[in-house]
Image (tube, rainbow, N blue to C red):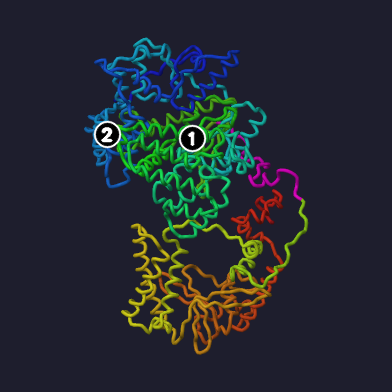
Amino acid sequence: MTSTLPPPLPEHPAGAVAALAAGATVVTATERLARVLRREHDLARRAGGLTAWPAADVLPMGAFLARLAADSLDASGALPPDLPPPELAGLLWLDAVGDAGLDAGVLATAAARAWHAATLHGITLAQLQSACDSADAEALTGWVQQYRARLQATGYAELHEVTWGLARGERPLPAAALPRQLVVAGFDPLPPLYRALLDRFAASGVAVTAAPPPCQGARLVRRQAPDPATEIAAAAAWARERLEASPGARVAVVVADLATQGAAVRRAFLDVLDPGWRTRPVPGQRLAVSLGRPLAGYPAIHAALAWLEVVTGSAAWPAVSLVLRSPFVGLAAEAGARGRAEWRLRESGRTSFAPAAVVAALGDGAPVTAARLDEAAGIAAACRSGGPAQLAGVIGSLLAAAGWPGEAASGSTTAQALAGFRQLLETLAGGERLVGRGSLARFVGLLRNLAGERTFEPESDVAAVQVLGVLEAEGQAFDHLWITGLRADRWPPPARPLPLLPLALQRAAGIAEATPALLQALWARRFARLTAAAGEVVASWPDQDGEEELLPSPLLAGIASGEPAVPAASTRRDRDAVALVGPSPVVVDDPPPAFAGPQVRGGTRVLSLQATCPAEAFVVGRLHARALPPPPLPLTDAARGRVVHALLQELYLLPECRTGLARLARDALRAAFDTVRERVLPRLMPGSDPLTVALRAREAARLWRLVRQLREHDATRGDFTVSVEETRTVTVGGLELRVRLDRVEQHDGDELVLDYKTGQVQKKDWLPPRPADAQLPLYALTGHVGGVAVLRLRAEGVELDGVAEPAFGADLDLPRSFRNAGIDSWPVLVERWRNALDALAAEFRAGDFRIDSAARARADDQFVLVTRHHELRSPRAFAEPEEGE
């Protein structure tokens, strides 16, 4: 182990592509660079007039080492070492870490990375043991020992150990497999293991050289952007201009933090390069993002894993929802019925479902999908356990029963992802020594975890705009290159030593990420290579990120400044571009007919919507549309509110509680509460799983505290009699509305209507002429009502908040905002409310479909397919308002 850098390898005089043409083997630092060189070699052969030629021998270093190890023998001439499949090697580390009291998966990954770096830089186990300076290092030492013991027990060898044996002469090099010429590309620096192996090759007569980095004498300019989003949008517009000017040009944009911002960057580029991409099944044909995402993140694979979860046992809601919505499983022609089944299960409030429950929800509306799911559940039930090969066959049968991947599986990216998934399943099937026998559910979980851990990057069109990380751009040549994010705190980045591995060992071995000086020098070399890799290079940085002001990287010193990085004015939001495709629509004045019947669904909500968004009131009240409810969770705020309402309703129905809880002794109240609780909680929070049982117990304790607080509150309010859940009918503006009152109190002949609330309440929403919350105003018109109020039930206590006649106390006096509006008494308020609600009801009956520009988000929500207001707006309507507008 040494940090002294050996002299650099001699450079190949003609470069990697010429070396491939001469029959050399080229070993690259990344899989992407190997693909690029292979493609360039093939293009050069075709351009030379050839119709057939030997395949280029170019591969990343990991694949090259595995091939070399498979061809080698040990010192005694025995068989080549057996290497564990890379996809399953993590299982060895999981076994080594065992039960560490924390997230074993995170620790196993950290230990594997640390030991990989250690062996790559020549750090031995003995050196690690002697350098232990912390509990973390001691833990790593123990895990490495367990890992190596597990390797030996399963009959596998470690790739780096085999490679060191070859480099040091402890194993004979496979002479028949040695290339005449070996060229390495994209490495800076060469780790000690790789350099030692190449030196052994050179000593054995192999011509070892390094591919020179591209050097094109770039026109280099730097640009400043106001923020990261503007910088990315400007780079996308620039890339589009370059590609349209020269369709065959090699255009690339480097994004340093692509690993964390990749999804947002991809969307930003697609909005510019492929307007309307969201409306197409295979978007982004002009864009290649080198963001390898987990294999499980590709839609077809995600759907397959969800299907397997559903048919092999009780599945969580996300998997059930995906199976019912995905075009990759089930019958696509039954999409409508499947969507309705999803809605029914969503509204059930349950968070997990057995296969039979999903089949029942599908019913007769989706018979094919129901039959497929029932068939797959039967296959899973017939084979609950087995070996990897047997269970992999069962997985294939389960997916075949689903009709997976279906007709929706189109496009090169999906095809490559499917191939990668099938390869992973085959690898798992052959992993008898590592996987062992087990249950089908365990096997499915293992497949899901491996698909989530495996990074998969599909091959892309060479003519597309490439968006690359820094390492992925190494060694490539471009015509036009834009390097983004050149801010002082990231170019160069701060040192980040590997966890677990002693810092002294990392620095002694020359690991750049642990040594600030080495890291700074490394990133300076990377920047120099990138700026020489294209004929035109733009280097940019954002001036501000949120509230943080940024400085440019010191690497930009001395580079001439160009125009500010601002996207072209013609760049439109995606939906605006889609709206402008085709001829302008001709709108005929065709108002909806007046509302025919007096009764309307939705009660008070219709009038509240009419006050804030008449279009939504029309959709809900007249078209009977409903917004998709949120996914079921064990105990949401809304669910807790329903539990409180149901419990108080049943509690005040008890004869002993009708005159208030304060009249009951504590023991009697507890007995009444327990009686009601045992009826309400199992009904509204069903389930026997440990989580639901624990949540029910916690909710019961919370409800009892709430009831005690309510008892104390009732004691302060004098004599009254309670009736609950009264249904009344009120007519406003010709509309007949049925309302259900949570609680009506009789006070000496006067009624006080109360509504239970567990969330926030704002009195300004009750203010005429357009009360955004029309519930209490409408309640005030239902009879001889002397006041309306909300009973706020919160952990801090119970609070009464509303407006009423003076006889009900100062707490319910008219607020100042009402008096400022000329409302100085309860009768005046009731009259103003009636006039306001009559006007809102008249608007609704007339077919009002306006969209308030100040509340456009409501029309943009789930009802946008009905409002379709984007189709009638010009792009100018979506621009930011100019000063003074």
Q: Secondary structure at mark 1?
A: helix
Q: Position of residue 313 (x, y in %)?
A: 39, 49
Residue at image x 36%, y 74%? Answer: 675
Q: Position of residue 191 (x, y in %)?
A: 36, 25
Q: Position of residue 680 (x, y in %)?
A: 40, 69
On the picture, is 554 further left or further right than 566?
Answer: left
Q: Residue 719's quadrant in the figure?
A: bottom left
Q: Residue 148's quadrant in the figure?
A: top left
- The magenta segment is 559-585
Question: Earlier along the polypeptide chain: callout 1 or callout 2?
Answer: 2
Q: Nearer the viewer, residue 560 or 828?
A: 828
Residue type, numbered disc 1: Leu
On the picture, is 854 further left or further right than 446?
Answer: right
Is 370 one of the magenta-colored residues?
Answer: no
On the picture, is 493 further left or further right than 223?
Answer: left
Residue 554: tell me if it is visible. no
Quadrant of the frame with the N terminus: top left
562 is higher (above) or lower (below) than 619: above
Residue under label 1, please give it. 418
Quadrant of the frame with the C terminus: bottom right
186 is higher (above) or lower (below) than 87: above
Q: Classify 10 Å Cα crowding around label 1: few (below 14), some (14-19), many (20 and above).
A: some
Q: Classify 10 Å Cα crowding around label 2: few (below 14), some (14-19), many (20 and above).
A: many
On the picture, is 122 further left or further right than 450?
Answer: left
513 is higher (above) or lower (below) than 795: above
687 is higher (above) or lower (below) than 64: below
Residue 115: tell me if it is visible. yes
Residue type, numbered disc 2: Tyr
Q: Residue 604's quadrant in the figure?
A: bottom right
Name the mark on residue 147. 2
Disc 1 + disc 2, Cβ < 8 Å? no
